[in-house]
Image (tube, rainbow, N blue to C red):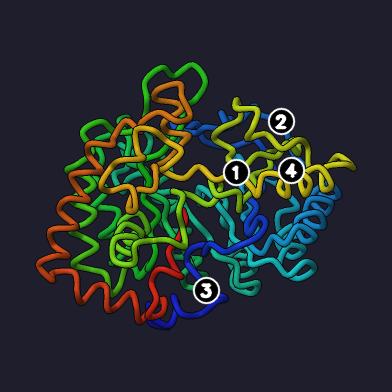
């Protein structure tokens, strides 16, 4: 299947598209336990974490999500592969409830049987990949198992699983993002999620978002321009779509900030964004409570969902690039400034990328790329602007 065919197929959509109405996706943390100790994990997931949803509780979450109109279920943790009943959970999500299902994993626990099941159920799998340097990987993850994870990625791909990579840009390692992107191209991965927005592990005072990220972001932009026909870097592609199509259909930076997503932790607590748990307005109660569904519907009817658009953020409301950035990641702003409505720490870096992008667009240097995106998503890019 070519990249264009992949992107045009609803069953193989690489990202969640926005739309009107209630929540479109639910990010479900089935456990808080993880075999790694990544310093940027906003969940503080460790080997000693014990919160976990039972299979029966997960069935209740699935049923509630279905009634609320959720279409996409993202199964995560902690590390979901440490849960023995993960295969049953995946089958239930896909077959019993009909969710478009994705598995979010560090890739360490992918067995042959699990790879075959993911292929059989057509479950997309997102593997976090900080670096392809073994020493750097061990430093950030706490385990020297990068070769195993790379082998597991290839194992899934050999079974026909659609694999995506998630690559953070942060201070804690010397970022070699281009090496990860090139590895993705070399082995045939077609979608990479690049993000500058990560929270902090409890006790870590350093903000983990990379300062002076302009060079890394510009490298990613240049890589996308050169490889757009074989690789989608969502951060860059979304910027280009927003610039070319104005982006009216997606007026907030991410799906949670538009009220179109839920995140449920391993105790059942629900939030618009799982990286923001200290703001009362973003807490939604416990999805396992009998009154959750009615309370959620009443709240959404009264507020028409949370919508943190740039016009509601003073530092963004007059910015010339607000239609591209859409206010940036609010969780990153909260960690950096202590204020949900504050600036993101790398705002200046992003503006450097936007300025280069706009100049290239005005010179016609992005015409082929934009034509390709129209072929992939449809002529009206505005209607297909993605939220992260």
Number of residues whose C-alpha sits closer than 10 Å to that of mark 3, classed few (under 14), some (14–19) or many (20 or more):
some
* Residue nearer the viewer, 290 or 43: 290
Per the image, label 3 sits on a secondary structure element best described as helix
Quick check: 147 above or below 183?
above
Quick check: 361 above or below 37?
below
* Residue nearer the viewer, 3 or 212: 212
Q: Residue at x 30, y 73 (%)?
A: 230
Q: Which mark is residue 50?
A: 2
Q: Which mark is residue 225?
A: none
| Cα separation between marks 2 and 3 | 34 Å
Number of residues whose C-alpha sits closer than 10 Å to that of mark 4, classed few (under 14), some (14–19) or many (20 or more):
some
* Residue nearer the viewer, 371 or 97: 371
| Cα separation between marks 3 and 4 | 32 Å
Of the numbered discs 2 and 4, the one sitting upstream in the chain is 2
Q: Quadrant of the image for the N terminus?
A: bottom left
Counting from the top left corner in percent of width and height, residue 361 is at: 17, 65
| Cα separation between marks 1 and 2 | 31 Å
Counting from the top left corner in percent of width and height, residue 265 is at: 68, 39
Number of residues whose C-alpha sits closer than 10 Å to that of mark 2, classed few (under 14), some (14–19) or many (20 or more):
some
Q: Tell us which disc is closer to us: 1 or 3.
A: 1
Residue position for label 1: 306
Residue position for label 3: 12
Q: Tell us which disc is closer to us: 2 or 4.
A: 4
Q: Residue furthest left?
A: 363
Per the image, label 2 sits on a secondary structure element best described as loop
């Amino acid at each position: 299947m070519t990249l264009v065919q992949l992107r045009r197929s609803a069953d193989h959509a690489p990202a969640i598209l926005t739309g009107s109405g209630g929540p479109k996706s639910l990010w479900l943390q089935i456990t808080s336990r993880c075999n790694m100790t990544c310093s940027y994990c906003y969940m503080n997931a460790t080997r000693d974490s014990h919160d976990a949803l039972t299979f029966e509780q997960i069935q209740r979450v699935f049923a509630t999500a279905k009634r609320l109109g959720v279409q996409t279920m993202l199964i995560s943790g902690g590390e979901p592969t440490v849960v023995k009943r993960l295969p049953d959970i995946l089958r239930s999500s896909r077959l019993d409830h009909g969710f478009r299902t994705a598995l979010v994993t560090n890739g360490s626990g992918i067995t042959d049987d699990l790879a075959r099941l993911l292929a059989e159920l057509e479950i997309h799998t997102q593997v976090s990949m900080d670096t392809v340097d073994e020493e750097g990987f061990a430093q950030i993850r706490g385990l020297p198992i990068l070769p195993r994870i790379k082998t597991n990625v290839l194992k899934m791909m050999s079974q026909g699983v659609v694999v995506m990579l998630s690559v953070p840009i942060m201070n804690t390692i010397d970022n070699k993002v281009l090496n990860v992107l090139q590895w993705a191209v070399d082995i045939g991965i077609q979608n990479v999620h690049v993000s500058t927005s990560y929270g902090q592990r409890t006790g870590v005072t350093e903000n983990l978002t990379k300062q002076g990220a302009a060079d890394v972001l510009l490298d990613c932009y240049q890589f996308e321009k050169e490889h757009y026909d074989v690789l989608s870097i969502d951060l860059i592609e979304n910027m280009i779509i927003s610039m070319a199509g104005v982006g009216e259909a997606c007026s907030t930076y991410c799906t949670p900030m538009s009220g179109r997503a839920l995140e449920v932790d391993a105790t059942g607590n629900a939030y618009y964004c799982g990286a923001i748990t200290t703001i009362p307005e973003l807490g939604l109660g416990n999805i396992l409570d009998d009154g959750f569904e009615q309370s959620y519907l009443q709240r959404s009817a009264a507020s028409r969902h949370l919508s943190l658009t740039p016009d509601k953020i003073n530092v963004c409301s007059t910015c010339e690039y607000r239609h591209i950035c859409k206010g940036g990641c609010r969780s990153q702003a909260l960690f950096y400034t202590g204020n949900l409505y504050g600036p993101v720490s790398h705002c200046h870096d992003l503006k450097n990328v936007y300025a280069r992008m706009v100049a290239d667009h005005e010179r016609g240097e992005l015409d082929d790329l934009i034509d390709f995106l129209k072929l992939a998503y449809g002529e009206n890019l505005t209607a297909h602007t993605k939220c992260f």
